[in-house]
Amino acid sequence: MKHARVRYQEAVHRATERDGALLLADGRVVAFEAVDWLPPLEPTPRPRTILALGLNYADHAKELEFKAPEEPLVFVKGEGSLIGHRQLTRRPAGVQFMHYECELVIVIGRTAKKVRRDDAYDFIGGYTVANDYAIRDYLENWYRPNLRVKNRDTCTPIGPWRVDAQDVPDPMALALQTTVNGKLTQSGNTRDMIFDAPFLIEYFSRFMTLQPGDLILTGTPDGVVDCQPGDVVVTEIEHIGALVNTIQGAS
């Protein structure tokens, strides 16, 4: 099932997809265009922890002229960076290179501590799509991206759906793509991750407890390009959904 969180008539609602429309939890059916889309966070409206992987696709590491990592390169994101489907992302004034990153997001479904790889999928509640923008101007190195690169307000659109884990038969074989103004600029597959979903659940849960609603952004393949104000960027993952975002100039 596809789940969403939306604002409709000044109230926040949980919703599910129903025949090309939204079925609100109170039983009303509304059009996709009638709502403001929020990050589809469950079971809590705020993630406790947001973990993000750098250089988790070998082709992207090569694109950036870096050696593929031998251990996950991880950074933590703040929830203030998250916005929903069809929302606006601000491009800072004077920036020379700001690019999208289409990423599969793992949504933790239940408390995970010292989980074995073979049991990892039991702890995944669902999946969504993220567009994890990076501001390359502020990059010191890809191994430790600083806050101005990856934690800016509005720079992590997520959604539109959270899809139940049982409805994604093989999350490690999903096609990803990005279009900018309708032109295909990025194409890949989750099978090309260096560290796959079961590995990441096992790895993180060895030293930290993962809680329901925590998010793991799993990295992006190669094919990133600079995005300018007015650009419409669509990051799409097979079986999960198409996340639409528009770049806005600095106010």
Image (cartoon, rainbow, N blue to C red):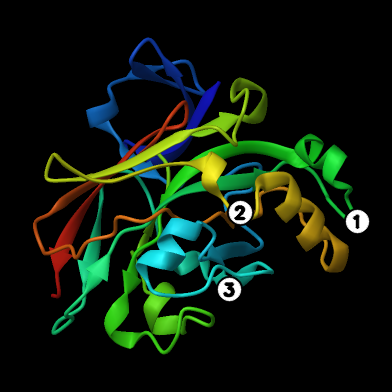
Position of residue 177 in the picture relative to residue 66 (left or right): left
Please determine whether, in this image, residue 51 is positioned above or below residue 221.
below
Position of residue 213 in the picture relative to residue 94 (left or right): right
Q: Earlier in the sequence, mark 3 or mark 1?
A: 3
What residue appears at the point 61 percent right and 57 percent down from the top-left corner? Answer: 47
Instruction: Name the kind of residue labelled 3 in the image.
Output: Phe
What residue appears at the point 51 percent right and 29 percent down from the top-left corner? Answer: 3
Q: Nearer the viewer, mark 3 or mark 2?
A: 3
Frontmost residue, 100 versus 13: 100
What residue appears at the point 27 percent right and 65 percent down from the top-left corner? Answer: 99
Q: Which residue is mark 3?
A: 75
CA distance for labels 3 and 2: 12 Å
Q: Earlier in the sequence, mark 1 or mark 2?
A: 1
Any mark on residue 114, and which?
A: 1
Identity of the residue furthest to the top in this view: 19
**Category of crowding for the residue at label 2, using alpha-carbon neighbours closer than 10 angstroms: few (below 14), some (14–19), many (at least 20):** many
CA distance for labels 1 and 2: 17 Å
Frontmost residue, 34 versus 218: 218
**Category of crowding for the residue at label 3, using alpha-carbon neighbours closer than 10 angstroms: few (below 14), some (14–19), many (at least 20):** some
Identity of the residue furthest to the bottom in this view: 140
